[in-house]
Image (spheres, rainbow, N blue to C red):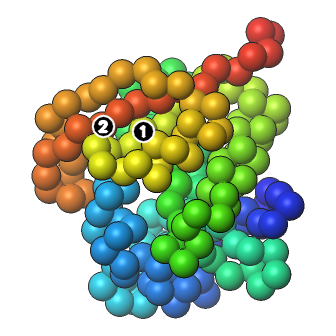
Amino acid sequence: MIETKRLLLRPWEETDAESLFEYAKDERVGPIAGWPVHTSVENSREIIKTVLSVPENYAVCLKEDNRAIGCVGLRLGQSSNLAIPENEGEIGYWIGVPFWGQGLIPEAVRALIRHAFDELHLARLWCGYFDGNEKSKRAQEKCGFIYHHTNRDIYWEAMNDIRTEHITCLENSISDR
C-alpha cells in the first residue's frame, strides 16, 4: 500500500467490483484510455481478477472511505506495452469522471514515481496518451514527464482500432540507479 495526503493506493479486491463498474461504465473514461467500457458488475469483477490484480497495480482510493475511484499501475520491462528494458517501467492510470480536475491522478502518479525510483530503483519511467486525451497529457506534464516520440497508426487490440499514441519519459535523476 502507498499513502499520499488524500489517497490510499492499494491492491484491487473483488469487493471493489461495484465501485469499479460505477466509474468504468462511463464512455468518457475507458475508450480514451484504450479499454472498453465495463458492461456489468460481474464484468468488472472479472477484470479485477484477470487484469487489475497484478503486481504494482493499485486501486486509487480516497482515504476517507477506501473506495476504489480509479487505478494507477506500473508495468516493468517486458510487461509494458512498450519495448523497454527490465530496469524501466511504464505508468498507466485513470480516474472516475466525478474526480476529474481535483489533482488526484497527479498525486497518485507522483507517489508511484517515488516508489519506482526510490524503492524499485528504476532508471526511467515511460507514459503514453492517445490523440485527444488532453487530460492525460496534462497529468503527465504536471508529474514531470517530457515528450519523447509519437507512434502513429498503431493497432490497439483492446479497442480493435487504429490510434496515434504520444509517449513521454521521466529519467531517474539519481545517477547510481
Q: From the viewer's side, name the closer residue of 173 and 58.
A: 173
Q: Residue at x 59, y 72 (%)?
A: 99
Q: Which mark identifies residue 165?
A: 2
Tell me if label 1 and label 2 are in contact, CB under 8 Å.
Answer: yes
Q: Residue at x 52, y 55 (%)?
A: 93
Residue 75 visible to the viewer: no
Q: Which mark identifies residue 31?
A: none
The secondary structure type at the circle numbered 2 is: strand
Three-letter code, disc 1 = Gly
Quadrant in which the N terminus is drawn: bottom right
Q: From the viewer's side, name the closer residue of 133 and 40.
A: 133
Give the mark count. 2
Q: From the viewer's side, name the closer residue of 158 and 161.
A: 161
Q: Residue at x 72, y 44 (%)?
A: 110
Quick one: label 1 or label 2, which is nearer the N terminus?
A: 1
Question: Is 109 displayed left or right of 92 in the figure?
Answer: right
Question: Is 23 displayed left or right of 165 in the figure?
Answer: right
C-alpha span from label 1 to label 2: 6 Å
Query: Which residue corresponds to mark 1?
Result: 128
Q: Could you tell me residue 23's position as x and y percent?
A: 47, 79
Q: Could you tell me residue 40's position as x and y percent?
A: 35, 89
Reply above or below: 79 against 56. above
Q: Residue at x 49, y 74 (%)?
A: 97
Quadrant in which the C terminus is drawn: top right
Reply above or below: 57 against 27. above
Question: Is 62 displayed left or right of 70 in the figure?
Answer: right
In the rendered image, which quarter is residue 144 located in?
top right
